[in-house]
Image (cartoon, rainbow, N blue to C red):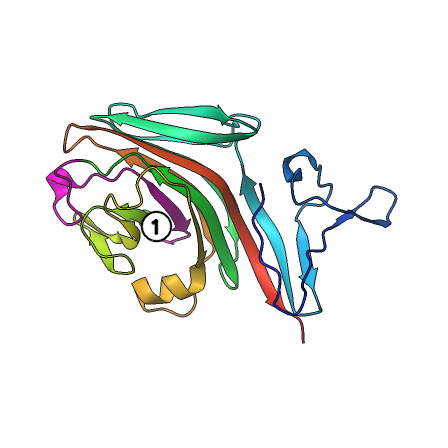
Amino acid sequence: MLFMNAAPQCGIFMYIRVCPHGGRCALRSILFNMRRLTWVTLGLVLTCSGETSRTVLFREDFESGVSSRWKPIKFSGETKYVVVREKTNSFLEGRAQSSATGLGAELKEVPAEDATISWKWKIDKIPPGASDDKKNTFDHTARLFVAFKTLLGPPRSINYVWANRTESGKTFHHPSSNRSRFIAVESGNEKAGRWIIERRDIAKDWKTLFGDENPPPIVGIGFMTDSDGTESTVTGCYDEIVLEKTATKK
């Protein structure tokens, strides 16, 4: 299911697709079967009351499995990623057993200005004994990252993490890399077992973490479930990853 917010003045959702004949076909009553729609534009544009438009730049719902655009990111062992079907919905489940591997998708220098990323996730639990500041226990059941273009060295990244002990809303750095910075979007076991929907303003988060108002282009999106440091078994689930560009019409 694709999650979107209409402007307060709208009162209803309006979805438009561009048909192959050049015309626009209005769609009705599609709040419940969004997955069955085939969008023929490169991006999905949502406009409401002349206020805000959103163009989808990247979307993954795992309804067709794990596509070839997702490449493994290997550190230690192998986290098992499988698509799970739950009633009418499919999602990706990552199960780490003393392992640390992720999946990443490359993007072609997507502008970060006015970009937002949304997703939903859930965990079974945080890794027992894990920390957010010590290298040997730096494990997280769920982490989604956005990588940015750099001229030298590895790309800098924003990591949206389900933290272990850090309070939600707080930030921290990877204990062995200043280029990888984290925002604790959720924390602890209080919400474990429940799907949580998130949406983040990428440029705003970049400024918070790196102190720069001009983020470089986005070159990758990925996620990782890891537990190698604590040698534990944890499960993180991911779905509906959507990168959008928002614009306000004057």
Single out the residue that lies furthest toward the bottom.
250
The residue under label 1 is: 160
User: Magenta stretch: residue 150 in it?
Assistant: yes
Q: In the picture provided, is 91 more to the left or to the right than 208?
A: right
Front one among 206 and 155: 206
Vertical arrangement, residue 178 with respect to residue 108, above or below: below
Residue 215 visible, this orientation: no
**Principal SS element in the magenta part?**
loop
Vertical arrangement, residue 9 with respect to residue 121, above or below: below
Front one among 146 and 52: 52
Vertical arrangement, residue 2 with respect to residue 61, above or below: below
**Quadrant of the rendered structure where residue 101 is?**
top left
Residue 206 image offset from top left, x and y in percent: 37, 62
Residue 203 image offset from top left, x and y in percent: 44, 63
Which residues make up the magenta segment? 128-151
Vertical arrangement, residue 106 with respect to residue 116, above or below: above
User: Magenta stretch: residue 161 in it?
Assistant: no
Q: Secondary structure at mark 1?
A: strand
Q: Where, quadrant-wise, is the N terminus in this rendering?
A: top right
Front one among 150 and 111: 111
Give the residue type that dot 1 points to: Tyr
Residue 11 image offset from top left, x and y in percent: 67, 63
Q: In the picture provided, is 55 more to the left or to the right than 175?
A: right
Residue drawn at (28%, 53%) of the image: 182
Residue drawn at (87%, 49%) of the image: 23
- Local packing at callout 1 (Cα closer than 10 Å; few below 14, some 14-19, many 20+) is many
